Image (cartoon, rainbow, N blue to C red):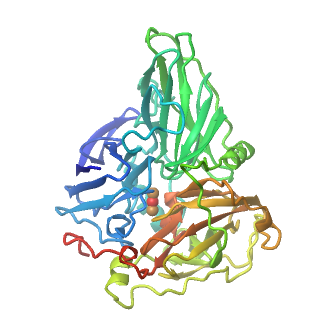
Amino acid sequence: CMVRHYKFNVVLKNTTRLCSSKPIVTINGKYPGPTISAREDDTVLVKVVNHVKYNVSIHWHGIRQLRTGWADGPAYITQCPIQPGHQYVYNFTITGQRGTLWWHAHILWLRATVHGALVILPKRSVPYPFPTPHKEEVLVLGEWWKSDVEAVINEALKSGLAPNVSDAHTINGHPGPVSSCPSQGGFTFSVNPGKTYMLRVVNAALNEELFFKIAGHQLTVVEVDAVYTKPFKTNTIVIAPGQTTNVLVTAGRRAGRYMVAASPFMDAPILVDNVTATATLHYSGTLGSTPATLTSLPPKNATSIANNYTNSLRSLNSNTYPAKVPLKVVHSLLFTVGLGVNPCSTCVNGSRVVADINNVTFVMPTISLLQAHFFNISGVFTDDFPGNPPIAYNYTGTQPTNLQTTKGTRLYRLAYNSTVQVVLQDTGMITTENHPLHLHGFNFFEVGRGIGNFNPKKDPKKFNLIDPVERNTAGVPSGGWTAIRFRADNPGVWFMHCHLEVHTTWGLKMAFVVDNGKGPNETLLPPPSDLPKC
Ligand code: C2O
């Protein structure tokens, strides 16, 4: 194995999209940012130098960070942010993972433009468990705002209302021609007829789950969140912010150009950015002026397409890549996730929208939780996060009389190596909505999923403990629940939150603190000397 060195300069870059220009925060002037490539077992060193006026931190989304929580990246959770003019070297080893992950800023809404792919190839001479593709291509899906993204969220926080939706979606940084700017081109990738390609699709959008489709081509899903799946054919994939999906696509024999498209999946009756992003699949030997074969995507409320897709995903669970599902659980938790309303005297309606897990709206600390844990600093957090909902919940969309949440920086404590089950239940306090929940530091198995209230007597009997999909971000279906299981084999403090950035901002987040184990390889390593200070 190797040590891979990267340098990330955080710089402003004037960028034109939708026929207008604005300075955006980037890594090395690129949007999307540079792809990190490594192999399983490699060590990755990324020196991040902050040249902008914002505090910055970078998260390596999906990397386990075994014993190296100091390199995980969420600001005020595992580190203080890198202040303007300062730098920090993220140093981590990729252990037992291969596939597509990604990296993104993990502070405020900077990840709108500060993100990129992280490609982990298998160990040298270890093949994929499917025919080797002729070529691979990374496709990062994103969202673009014409106005300054930090201003969008700051205004919303002041008013207590929902922030403006984005003005376009992007594929590798480009919306493609849209009615507000028909002249702009989109991303194009070239293929040779008869060859098979692997697309590494990342959803880096801030707030929108997406449908993704290629005109005239079937997609074979072979991996999600850097875990191999049973190959499965589909016309459309659904991908939530935070998730990654590898698909194989075989080019036919005939020349041509085909539309590649992404548009939102959102079944709540709330505003979304409805602009479809397009790119082009170009067969070599086809004239550039040949019109592309078009495709149409499912409507934004196509819940059954989304659920059918998600319910079809399975771990590969082969001899080489077994699914190690915990069969018994030590901690059995039920977390309600949803939105609430809290009083706010300075807000437009005298109230503000908040979000919570088990009625706790998470309050960000002012020094990092991991430091507080490691150095035993009291008064930063409590470890009394409720393991069950303190108030009755429902999923019907009928509002309970009390929408108010409590506030706190409360963590849930897990003994090293204990097994954990969390049932995540959407509550429909304001409206039912999908919530892609992301857990740092672990992969989990999605053992069950259903619509309505979770039934603790009946539903566990139907859990898939053989080959459930293993991932790091799971969509809690709107008005329903999902059950996840994992083994707490990584000491440290691990954030769990909705990957719709607006919900995270509103407080749909919590953290687990995992104690050290007894063996020498079961303890959190000490912090690196350049760990940023608050
Ligand atoms: Cu991809 Cu806590 O984030």
Pick the front one: 291 or 402: 291
Indicate the quadrant containing the C terminus: top left, top right, bottom left or bottom right: bottom left
Q: Residue furthest front?
A: 319
- Asked if 195 appears above or below 350 in the picture, the reply is above
Residue beneath the point at 29% across and 41% down: 30
Pick the front one: 335 or 470: 470
Residue beneath the point at 47% across and 81% down: 409
Is 87 positioned to the left or the right of 429 in the image? left
Q: Residue furthest right?
A: 458
Residue 138 pos. (x, y %): 42, 36
Residue 398 visible in this rendered orientation of the protein: no
Is 59 positioned to the left or the right of 180 in the image? left
Q: Residue furthest bottom?
A: 378
Residue 322 pos. (x, y %): 58, 54
Residue 267 pos. (x, y %): 69, 50
**Which quadrant would residue 126 be assigned to in this image?**
top left
Quarter of the displayed picture in which ligand 1 can be seen: bottom left
Count of numbered marks: 0
Pick the front one: 517 or 341: 517
Is 264 positioned to the left or the right of 389 in the image? left
- Asked if 251 appears above or below 109 in the picture, the reply is above
Residue 215 pos. (x, y %): 60, 24
Residue beneath the point at 45% across and 67% down: 158
Residue 225 visible in this rendered orientation of the protein: yes
